[in-house]
């Protein structure tokens, strides 16, 4: 039996996708701004954040409204509670894209400290994780969600590498490099946090589809 | 040890099979909800537990049902009386006897010769207190029960059922005739009663099952499709048919 409720759930699904696309674009632009040292793109990321914030509020309101009016159960309940969580994670990811853009603005007028190698690698992982996380949500694909969650340690490893290199090879040797090294270090941290939020999304997708809680025991996914 | 166990329970009304291989274990002093669409067999199952189906012609039952490890389907009339004393039942429409509040409560005590006359006052008070009616009715004990409000009547029926100190309370849609406030108060009462009684409730109201019960069984076309912890049934049911029913896709 097709329910009116199904239509409303579909609308919510569409809104979340719209939000996901906006967030993906913000990350992409912030990383491009970093790679090409492009002030304008960085400023665009910062300016677009208020739209994403607004979208977050709209989606949250819709979820609360649907819960209040339909008292959903089982799969519907899992979809709605998961949507609220994914919505929150997406908004945080967009904030991190803004953080990256701000670091880019701090760096853009200064000479490049070193050629970027690990940070672009980390950003590729982050972008691929978020794309896969969103695809896993759209297609209710638990295997893909697991893959996303299991890629997170790789991001942590890269972040540590960047951190060690910047501290040991640059800041420890020449403290004057700090004003260029610290923003890079923070960017690595922002990217790694993006991966953490993306992992949350993947874990939520697994819960949404299978009702299984995998949070905090990822080893079970292997 | 579960309070009630059904083992491959089948029941036919003539040639119509109303219960199909029902296997279920009801835990003591917990609330067990049975949900399912009309005609799924949930009331029939409830009525097996106090053998109310015995009154219906052409009923045939196979399988085993035990309460406290005793087979309840066996036994003559005297066993049946003992069984009914152990089990109180509350129905959809409150059905107090057309007698006073007081007479309603002591009715079962008299039938089962459970108390002496000079104990009646105390037992009436106890029963009414346990359903939170005492303060409202202590000045009106000799009023005809038919003059009470619907919720008061239902509380009185629960008081009448528990006056004979049963172990088990069967509730067949106990709130469906009540407004939301009365329903909420009866649900609170059920939570109180759970401390002393094993409660089985049949309900159409899924939110009610989700709110009050510890365990839930979903029935469809005579079968117990799924039985488990209420929180699991309503958040992650294992069977697609349960999912479809509780999310309103069935039918």
Image (tube, coloured by chain):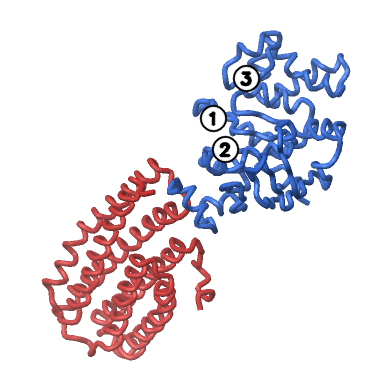
Chain colours: A red, B blue
Label number found at residue B176: 1
To the question of a shared chain for discs 3 and 1, the answer is yes
Task: Give SS at disc 2.
Answer: loop
Residue B6 versus residue B163 in the image, above or below? below
Q: Nearer the viewer, residue B185 or B246?
A: B246
Indicate which label's residue lies in the foreground, 3 or 2. Answer: 2
- Please tell me which residue is depicted at 51% across the width and 41% down the height of the picture: B207
Q: Residue furthest left?
A: A40
**Crowding at label 2, few (<14), some or many (≥20) Cα neighbours within 10 Å?**
many
Percent from the top left, x then y, of residue B147?
A: 61, 11
- Which residue corresponds to mark 3? B153
Residue B222 versus residue A21 in the image, above or below? above
Q: Chain of mark 1?
A: B
Label number found at residue B203: 2
Task: Give SS at disc 3.
Answer: helix
Q: CA distance from mark 3 to mark 1?
A: 13 Å
Q: Is residue B131 left or right of residue B232?
A: right
Q: Chain of mark 2?
A: B
To the question of a shared chain for discs 1 and 2, the answer is yes
Q: Earlier in the sequence, mark 1 or mark 2?
A: 1
Q: Is residue B194 left or right of residue A84?
A: right
Say whether marks 1 and 2 touch (CB < 8 Å).
Answer: yes
Q: CA distance from mark 1 to mark 2?
A: 8 Å
| Quadrant in which residue A85 is drawn | bottom left
| Quadrant in which residue B113 is drawn | top right
Residue B15 visible = yes
Report the number of numbered marks: 3
Q: Earlier in the sequence, mark 3 or mark 2?
A: 3
Percent from the top left, x then y, of residue A67?
A: 40, 45
Label number found at residue B50: none
**Crowding at label 1, few (<14), some or many (≥20) Cα neighbours within 10 Å?**
some
Q: Is residue B239 left or right of residue B167?
A: left
């Amino acid at each position: 039996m097709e329910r009116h409720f199904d239509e409303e759930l579909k609308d919510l699904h569409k809104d979340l996708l719209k939000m996901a696309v906006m967030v993906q674009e913000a990350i992409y632009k912030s990383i491009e701004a970093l790679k090409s040292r492009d002030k304008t793109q960085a400023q665009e990321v910062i300016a677009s954040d208020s739209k994403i914030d607004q979208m977050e509020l709209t989606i949250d309101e819709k979820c609360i409204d649907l819960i209040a009016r339909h008292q959903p159960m089982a799969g519907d309940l899992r979809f709605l509670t998961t949507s609220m969580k994914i919505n929150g994670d997406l908004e945080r990811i967009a904030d991190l894209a803004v953080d990256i853009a701000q670091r880019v603005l701090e760096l853009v007028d200064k000479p490049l400290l070193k050629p970027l190698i690990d940070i672009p690698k980390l950003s590729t992982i982050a972008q691929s994780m978020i794309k896969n996380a969103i695809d896993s949500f759209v297609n209710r694909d638990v295997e893909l969600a697991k893959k996303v969650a299991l890629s997170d340690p790789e991001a942590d490893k890269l972040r540590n590498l960047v951190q060690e290199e910047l501290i040991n090879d640059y800041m420890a040797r020449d403290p004057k490099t700090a004003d260029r090294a610290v923003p890079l270090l923070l960017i690595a941290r922002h990217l790694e946090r993006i991966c953490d939020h993306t992992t949350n999304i993947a874990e939520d997708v697994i819960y949404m589809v299978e009702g299984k809680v995998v949070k905090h025991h990822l080893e079970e996914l292997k | 040890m579960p309070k009630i166990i059904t083992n491959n329970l089948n029941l036919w009304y003539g040639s119509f099979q109303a219960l199909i291989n029902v296997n279920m274990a009801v835990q003591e002093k917990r609330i067990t909800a049975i949900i399912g669409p009309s005609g799924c067999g949930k009331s029939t199952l409830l009525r097996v537990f106090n053998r109310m189906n015995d009154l219906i012609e052409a009923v045939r039952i196979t399988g085993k049902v035990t309460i406290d490890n005793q087979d309840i389907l066996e036994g003559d009339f005297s066993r049946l009386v003992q069984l009914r004393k152990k089990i109180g039942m509350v129905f959809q429409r409150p059905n107090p006897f057309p007698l006073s509040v007081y007479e309603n409560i002591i009715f079962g005590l008299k039938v089962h010769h459970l108390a002496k006359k000079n104990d009646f006052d105390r037992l009436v008070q106890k029963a009414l207190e346990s359903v939170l009616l005492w303060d409202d009715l202590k000045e009106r004990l000799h009023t005809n029960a038919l003059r009470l409000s619907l919720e008061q009547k239902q509380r009185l029926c629960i008081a009448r059922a528990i006056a004979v100190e049963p172990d088990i309370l069967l509730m067949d849609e106990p709130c469906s005739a009540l407004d939301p406030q009365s329903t909420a108060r009866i649900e609170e009462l059920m939570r109180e009663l759970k401390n002393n009684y094993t409660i089985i409730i049949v309900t159409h109201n899924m939110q009610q099952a989700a709110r009050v019960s510890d365990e839930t069984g979903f029935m469809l076309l005579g079968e117990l499709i799924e039985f488990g912890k209420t929180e699991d049934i309503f958040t992650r049911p294992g069977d697609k048919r349960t999912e479809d029913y509780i999310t309103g896709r069935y039918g």
